[in-house]
Image (spheres, rainbow, N blue to C red):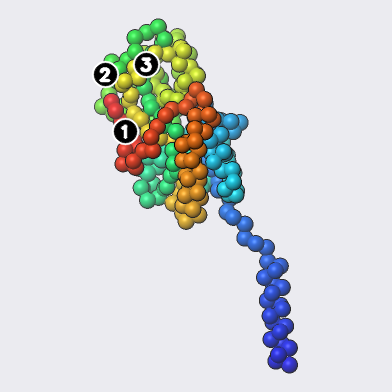
Amino acid sequence: MKRYLSGFRVLLFAAVILSTPAVADPVIRIAVPDITSLLTENRDGVYQRILHRALEGLDVPVTEQFFPYKRAMMVFEQHGADCIYSFTEVLERRLGDDAVIASFPLGKFTYYLFTPQDADPISSLSQVEGKTVGAVIGHETYLDGVLEGHDVNVIWSKSDAQNLAMLEHQRFGAMIAAVPDVRPFMDELSYDPKTPLLESYDRLTCHNTEANRQFLGKLSARMKSLKEAGLYEQLAGQLYVEFEDPAPAAEHSPLN
């Protein structure tokens, strides 16, 4: 009888194991901010193309949700998303260096002062002291430190295109924008490439969890391979900016 009960328990345990559904890999939820040309609601922005290519073959379930620039960061901070495109240094300052982790760069960006195409370029913020300058709302997360100590009236608008229109109608003395975001409008703008205001790197930024560490480890290896194989340049086209793999301590550099 005991032998019968023992065998029955083994069979029952095996049946339970077989009938229990396998635990699926956790879905990585990515918040997508609106960044001119680089991230779009249609999922065809440069960084999205690079990330989607890197995800091929990783067998990691990923979902993306598009938000206005500042809303995307709020959703991430409130843990409504596991990861977010960009904002690495901003989120390190807000949440702490150990609270977030980041991937190999998706690209490099650099802020400059821009004037109309037929005007002389501006090389420093001191040249727009007391004047009105346009910038995209949300970019103050990067630019506040650059603007600190300067008497510059910044009008924060919805897009680079809107700022360009205001600049052409002489509503602004200049506009602040990032390369490569603003490259589609470069034929209408003038700037001094030797005098950037700030330069940094866009990455996929995630909450520092074990699952996210494993995910970014695999993803970063794929991204680096794509970069070295020339796929970044192929996927980005005119929006490609060459960069070397940066040292962690030199990733965020206000320059003016």
Vertical side of 111 occupied by 205: above or below: below
Earlier in the chain: of badge 3 and badge 1, it is 3
View extreme (bottom): residue:
1
Vertical side of 164 occupied by 234: above or below: below
Q: Residue at x 49, y 53 (%)?
A: 214
The three-letter amino acid code for the residue at tag 2 is Ser
Residue 119 at what x, y percent from top left? 37, 8
The quarter of the picture where residue 120 lies is: top left
Q: Observer-nearest residue: 6 or 209?
A: 6
The residue to which callout 3 is attached is 191
Q: Secondary structure at mark 2?
A: helix
Task: Please state if 126 lies on the left or on the right of 221 as rendered.
Answer: left
Residue 147 at what x, y percent from top left? 31, 27
Task: Please state if 243 lies on the left or on the right of 64 as rendered.
Answer: left
The residue to which callout 2 is attached is 126
The quarter of the picture where residue 13 lies is: bottom right
Q: Residue at x 46, y 12 (%)?
A: 188
The answer to whether residue 159 is visible is no
Vertical side of 117 occupied by 27: above or below: below
Name the quarter where the N terminus is drawn.
bottom right
The residue to which callout 1 is attached is 253
Earlier in the chain: of badge 1 and badge 2, it is 2
Q: Secondary structure at mark 3?
A: loop
Residue 230 at what x, y percent from top left? 49, 32
Q: Residues within 10 Å of mark 3 (few under 14, many from 20)?
A: many
Q: Observer-nearest residue: 64 or 1?
A: 1
The three-letter amino acid code for the residue at tag 1 is Ser
View extreme (top): residue:
118
The three-letter amino acid code for the residue at tag 3 is Tyr
